[in-house]
Amino acid sequence: MPERKFSKDHEWIEVDGGVGTVGITDYAQGQLGDVVFVELPVVGKKVAKGDNAAVVESVKAASEVYTPVSGEVTAINQAIVDDPAKVNAEAEGGAWFFKLKLGNAGELSGLMDRAAYDAFLKTL
Amino acid sequence: MSNPHGTITGNRGLQLEEKLIFEQGVEGRCGVDLPDPPKVKSRMGGVERRGPIGLPGLSEPQAIRHYTRLSQKNFAIDAGMYPLGSCTMKHNPRLNEKAVRMPGLGDLHPMQPVSTVQGALALIDTLAHWLKTLTGMPAVAMSPAAGAQGELCGVMAIKAAHEAKGDHARKVILVPESAHGTNPATAAACGYAVEAIPANERGRVDLDAFKKELGPHVAGIMITNPNTCGLFENDIVEIGKAVHAAGGYFYCDGANFNAIVGRVRPGDLGIDCMHINLHKTFSTPHGGGGPGSGPVVLSAALAPYAPLPFVVHGPNGFRLVEEAKGEGAKTFGRLKAFHGQMGMFVRALAYMMSHGSDGMRQASEDAVLNANYVQARLGEVMTAPFPGPCMHEALFDDRFLNGSGVSTLDIAKALIDEGFHPMTMYFPLVVHGALLIEPTESETKETLDQFIAVMRGLAERAKKGDADFFHHAPRLTPRRRLDETLAARKPVLRWRPAPTERQAAE
Amino acid sequence: MRYLPHTDADRRAMLQAIGVPSIDSLFRDVPEAVRLKQSVDLPPQQGELEVERAIAGFAARNIGTSSAPSFLGAGAYRHHVPAAVDHLIQRGEFLTSYTPYQPEVSQGTLQYLFEFQTQVALLTGMDVANASMYDGASATAEAVMMANRVTRRERAVVSGNLHPHYREVVATHARYLGFAVDFLPPDPRANEDLAARIDDKTSCVVVQNPGFFGQVRDYTKLGEACHAKGALLIVVVNEIVSLGAVKPPGEMGADIVAGEGQSLGVALGYGGPYVGLFATRDRFVRQMPGRLCGQTVDADGQRGFVLTLSTREQHIRREKATSNICTNSGLCSLAFTIHLTLLGETGFTRLAALNHAKAAELADRLEKGAGVKVVNDSFFNEFTVSLNGKSAAEVAEKLAAKRILGGVPVSRLYPGRPELADLLLVAATETNTGEDMTALAAALKEAVR
């Protein structure tokens, strides 16, 4: 099973065969509250690590989703655009945001594993 | 039961339910009598409207009843204490409303020959004189429509001044994190990047850290004083000197001017520009969200760049400078059509003349006194992030609610049932769960005492763990808590006719 | 002082409760050197009677449009406002409330905003409208900036038929935010070819209908030309009554409508406050500036209204907001919506027809009776006359000396353009009587002789 990695900006990424699936963590959705709107990148867009790739909004907050690694967007999850509540219900499951073809797999090593991320959350 | 009150109508005594005008209209009904238009050959070039608009028809009594019923669903300063921090919800004198409606003011067209509006120009000039005198500044731009447009005015003047010196390297405006959202939004609207000014543990600008942020990349700073924590920036003079030494300009957000009118002249603090919200400090009505008026006082360095138009004294009376030549040669441009919010100028001047120099100083003192009284009397049961004295508003955080399961929002909603408008909540952002209370000078000691008693009672009830009571407040309002998530997820931003049965079947 | 409730005894008791000896000690954070020992050099407080007298003194030095025949337009129009409007907007619950951020105690304001948004959308033929902007000029500038965001382009094309103040406001924002604008020269005879200016870098084309000089145009083809190049069509309407008789921008394919709503319910008031209108298509709603009111339900399941989609706005999005606007024109939007409710479909379309008939009558009478030439081939309630080479500014002064507010010289808004110096904008509304027109025709005839 592919390993899941986490960023300090509360995104997760799971890589399978050179393609990463990116979403926001359960902690992130909890901080936002009820998600009301999601804006996703266009397929084909090239993004560099740390770029704003998507936007997720609750009633009183708007948050950028930064891509944890560089690459080219190959797919987006239209289901969360149509029903943003999915992000609250299954942030680390079916409510992924976009998939991207990795530009530099080496960037993954700068991310946290589950245990490190859980430890990071305890410091917040 | 079709409604929570168990009445047949859904009404609840004096609280009357009211449908949308679109649900009441009857074709052919009309609330205005107009003569039959004479038959003329259309000269509209064949671009006539073909179909109906879809506006509902109501008679005058229906319309009066509609808006009267709607009005009864609003809280208002006229009804009770409205302690919204940073909004200055003071009494709105009715003399001001009478004055603005006088023939010769309310019925002036903005493009009349200036020979026919000398009184209007004299009034603008008089108000300008009062504003300049109260702020100790040499010039004022009268045209900005509201505080946020005043901010644009100030920042555009700053940019124009740098450009006039050939300095195009300054790309950054420094703004504290505690600032109103309009400050960073304004800087961005003028093409500047925004960087944060560090704060100290006393809720003020950290002077040493601030100096390190300055440099040839900084166009200017935007600082609210008194600041959004309700505190006077005691290093303000050094801040001004430091920004000038670095070649930048000092924008002061004047939203909180009500604390210091007649006690401090912002010009003495070394500022370059400051907008004045006439709808806060000078009592023009908030009107459910506007209109406002945001004149901007300017230093000698920025005055040449003031926006068009402006009033000047000429040999034959007053003139309006409306073009970018002569006195207006260096203007940065224009922000709105015509000459500014004249209706607000008349009201503000009536307020100022009523108070006079002595009354305005007294008003500020009373505003500061009231806020400190609230802070002192609530300090035992609530938690203040910074020690006093405060200026015209008292800031609390939500530490007093720790472990209670009750939030700042819940307290505010419970306050509604007690007949008070909530304070400003969750602003400034630098304080967790902020509650910002601005009583203004208009409140009596008796009202303040009642407000304090209510707040103490609510704080104690929250601490006792009665969270459920708070989560379901308010209970006594025309509507209970509204589902803002639904509103944002599935926006319904206008009325549309229900589909007919046939359309629905298709 | 009648507005300040505290007695000296109150103040003493409160200072004691705070635990400070004097009011000065509450100002101790103010540096000593900048504390004023006494208030500034301005007159002392006055009673209501004295202030009223002083303000009336200013008013007496003006000639109001209600005391003289008036034909002034150019973006601000004199209309009859039903008495009910001014009564209702002065109800304290509307006048003295704040922005409806607490919806449980603001359903009155919120419901009328929802109705206002619907009315504006209906008039303009658009999907959705916001809860108002400052005025037509700032709304136009916001529309251009929105089009830049939507199209991710930075070059606007602006018609020579847009009100000169609106042009200047667009130019000011363009200069300071940093985007390009192609301004066409003033176009009194509506000869300009806007479609030729559009290319694949154009974010939008801005036209005004009826135009600044009065012409009425169908911009459907221009809209198609815009859309073919991926640009937006912005239609500005600054005489909103025209939409009772003229084809609405929505039917012409407009993407954004920016307007001035002063004509409904709002006093001329020497130029402000007025009410900016802003409408667009559903698909662009998240790029809109300003407040939006939306429908929802409360905890009991009853219909109610809230401010919504607020993440676009400065108080949440800060430097990434769609606009820095906060305070808008709340009470003016109330006046607008009440006036339009009273008019309804029947009254509004009749008002528009009446305005057009008055203007048509005036145009005929000026051409036949005053010997001036109407420049326009079409108009609604305002048109441009050419004064046979005479300075329109001087003519306007001569008319004013006879207490006739006879029109707006184009040179007042377009100074330094000799080719426009003899053009006068003349508007007629339902308020103008036959006697007014007779007086204007006679005085104008003499002035241009």
Image (cartoon, helix red, strand yellow):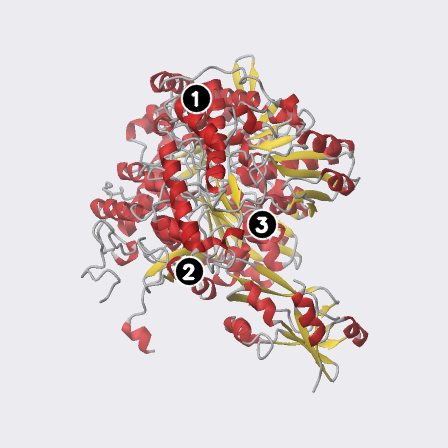
Marks 3 and 1, Cα distance to the nearest angstrom?
Answer: 35 Å
Marks 1 and 2, Cα distance to the nearest angstrom?
Answer: 45 Å
Q: Nearer the viewer, residue B23 or B214?
A: B214
Amino acid residing under circle 1: His
Give how far across and how far down residue C234 sits, in percent: 53, 52
Give the mark, 1 or 2, whose residue is nearer the N terminus. Answer: 1
What residue appears at the point 31 percent right and 78 percent down from the top-left corner? B505
Q: Nearer the viewer, residue C98 or C198?
A: C98
Marks 3,2: beta carbons within 8 A: no
User: Are the residues under marks 3 and 2 on the same chain?
Assistant: yes
Q: How packed is label 3: few (under 14 Cα within 10 Å), some, or many (20 or more)?
A: some
| Vertical order, B281 against A31 (above or below) | above
What residue appears at the point 33 percent right and 61 percent down from the top-left corner? C303
Give the mark, 3 or 1, whose residue is nearer the N terminus. Answer: 1
Q: Which mark is residue B429?
A: 3
Q: Which mark is residue B355?
A: 1
Numbered disc 3: secondary structure: loop
Give how far across and how far down residue B310 sits, in percent: 56, 26
Q: Which residue is mark 2?
A: B467
User: Are the residues under marks 3 and 1 on the same chain?
Assistant: yes
Report in which chain the residue with disc 3 lies.
Answer: B
Report in which chain the residue with disc 1 lies.
Answer: B
